[in-house]
């Protein structure tokens, strides 16, 4: 369910015409729907309600404070992966005991910061990290609550750059050696191994990996308890896929069906770290056509959003649905099968102004002919859009607007040229 719908020939976010927002706030512009955000959070909360999970919204997917705060206000915690994300989570009002901290390269300072904040779990990813965390915790008189992140060595399940649970990625402990390492820290004064963590990859469109991962988790939790570790938490990470092309994603209940048996069997408190599932389809990127051109036998739509605004197509060849905000009369409006032959459309590359041949939002995409000034919408841009945006080519990052019914709120202003140079010191003297 999302709240980006066409009505009377133009795209709305909830009750506001997107064209109105583009006129007011400029482009490129990220627009989020609060109703969609809450709908998706609620879907996960309901699917897993039987076990009262700790749902930690994954801040890396979209760390805007207003969005994180909305999640926290509606019962979520936060999953963070750096000191900066922890800072965001705390600023958004997340109680420490609803924060989980993952990441393969936590610095001593980040560890101290998280210990002071009283995080629920450190998802620890290596033996070296475990020992440093133990020392850091002892040095400030704390005991670090640890979930051992295990790489369950499953078959490939998503894009190679975002699959975190095939053998040989940098993430987590090798499933074959984790118990040996755990044995070595039984009774460690700075560590309390209270959980097991897996994050399988992202986005995942099947429940099978969660079923296989959960089965492995049951065995490991049993073995860890036999070693004397008081395992209370099973953290199954995030990764639930969303509709990028059509209706390809699973409902949250499908993941619950395969994860809940492990929760019942182990008696653990379940932790989840969903990001994309909540915010991915709650956000769109609106851009304006700057020029069109034909060259080398191809048609190009050059618009004002680039790979610095949404890097997913460049980085992963990701497919995002794209359609005019105000399509000409006679053209269909979404939902459309974007991979079919759409009448009155032509294969075109949707590209940005950045100086890279890899700067595109879509390649050979069937779209109507557009003209300078037309607005286009790139859908499913709420997750890993703004959070991966950069200032490459000294482009200012886009503004972000949150819509609630017939009200729109600017939740991040467009950057200025002064913002671009503000951190540079000692350069003009
Ligand atoms: C450890 C961890 N947890 C949670 C997530 C969130 O994943 P997603 O946005 O697919 O739910 C990620 C990113 O893939 C991650 O690395
Ligand atoms: N950034 C990725 C997914 C990786 C998430 C972090 N582990 C995306 O845009 O799909």
Image: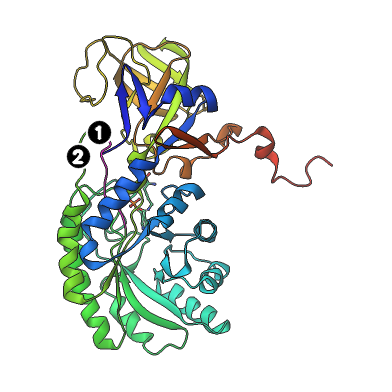
Residue at image coords 27%, 43%: 242
According to the picture, the residue beneath numbered tag 1 turns out to be 245
Quadrant of ligand 1: it is bottom left
Quarter assignment of residue 292: top left
Residue 64 shows in the view? no
Q: Residue 189 location in percent, x, y? A: 46, 88
Asked if one can make out residue 214 in the rendered structure from this viewpoint, the answer is: yes
Q: Residue furthest right?
A: 429
| Outermost front residue | 406
Q: Is residue 293 left or right of residue 116?
A: left
- Quarter of the figure with residue 153: bottom left
Q: Quadrant of the N terminus?
A: top left
Q: Secondary structure at mark 2?
A: loop
Q: Is residue 137 magenta?
A: no
**Res 248 label:** 2
- Asked if 46 appears above or below 195 in the picture, the reply is above
Secondary structure found at label 1: loop
Q: Nearer the viewer, residue 262 or 74?
A: 74
| 241 is within the stretch colored magenta | yes
Q: What's the mark number on residue 161?
A: none
Q: Decide: few, some or many residues near mark 1? Use Cα within 10 Å; few <14, some 14-19, many ≥20.
A: some
The answer to whether mark 1 and mark 2 are in CB contact below 8 A is yes
Residue 198, x across and y down, in percent: 30, 64
Q: What residue is rendered at 47% in x and 62% in y?
A: 94
Q: 336 or 126: which is nearer to us?
A: 336
- Range drawn in magenta: 238-244
Q: Residue at x 25, y 65 (%)?
A: 152
């Amino acid at each position: 369910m999302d709240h980006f719908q066409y009505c009377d020939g133009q795209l709305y976010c909830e009750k506001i015409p997107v064209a109105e927002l583009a006129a007011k706030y400029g482009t490129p512009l990220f627009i989020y729907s609060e109703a969609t955000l809450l709908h998706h959070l609620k879907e996960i909360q309901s699917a897993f309600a039987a076990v009262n999970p700790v749902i930690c919204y994954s801040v890396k997917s979209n760390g805007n404070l207003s969005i994180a705060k909305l999640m926290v206000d509606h019962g979520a915690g936060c999953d963070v992966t750096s000191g900066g994300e922890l800072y965001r989570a705390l600023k958004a009002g997340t109680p420490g005991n609803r924060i989980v901290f993952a990441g393969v390269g936590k610095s001593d300072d980040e560890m101290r910061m998280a210990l002071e904040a009283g995080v629920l779990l450190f998802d620890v990813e290596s033996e070296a990290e475990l020992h440093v965390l133990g020392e850091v915790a002892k040095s400030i008189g704390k005991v670090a609550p640890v979930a051992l992140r295990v790489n369950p060595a499953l078959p490939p399940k998503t894009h190679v750059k975002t699959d975190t649970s095939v053998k040989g990625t940098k993430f987590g402990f090798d499933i074959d050696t984790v118990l040996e390492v755990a044995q070595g820290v039984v009774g460690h004064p700075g560590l309390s191994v209270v959980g097991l963590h897996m994050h399988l990859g992202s986005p995942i469109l099947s429940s099978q990996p969660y079923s296989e991962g959960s089965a492995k988790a049951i065995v490991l939790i049993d073995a860890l308890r036999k070693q004397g570790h008081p395992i209370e938490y099973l953290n199954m990470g995030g990764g639930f896929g969303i509709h990028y092309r059509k209706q390809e994603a699973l409902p949250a209940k499908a993941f619950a069906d395969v994860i809940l048996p492990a929760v019942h069997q182990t008696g653990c408190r379940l932790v989840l770290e969903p990001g994309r599932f909540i915010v991915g389809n709650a956000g769109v990127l609106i851009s304006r056509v700057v020029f069109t051109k034909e060259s080398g036998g191809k048609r190009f739509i050059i618009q004002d959003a680039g790979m610095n605004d949404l890097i997913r197509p460049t980085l992963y060849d990701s497919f995002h649905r794209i359609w005019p905000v105000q399509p000409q009369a006679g053209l269909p409006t979404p939902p459309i099968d974007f991979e079919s032959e759409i009448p009155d459309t032509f294969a075109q590359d949707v590209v940005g102004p950045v100086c890279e041949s890899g700067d595109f939002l879509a390649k050979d995409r069937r779209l109507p002919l557009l003209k300078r000034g037309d607005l286009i919408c790139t859908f499913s841009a709420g997750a890993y859009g703004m959070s991966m945006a950069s200032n490459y080519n000294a482009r200012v990052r886009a503004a972000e607007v949150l819509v609630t019914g017939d009200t729109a709120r600017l939740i991040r202003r467009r950057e200025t040229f002064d913002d671009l140079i503000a951190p540079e010191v000692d350069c003009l003297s």
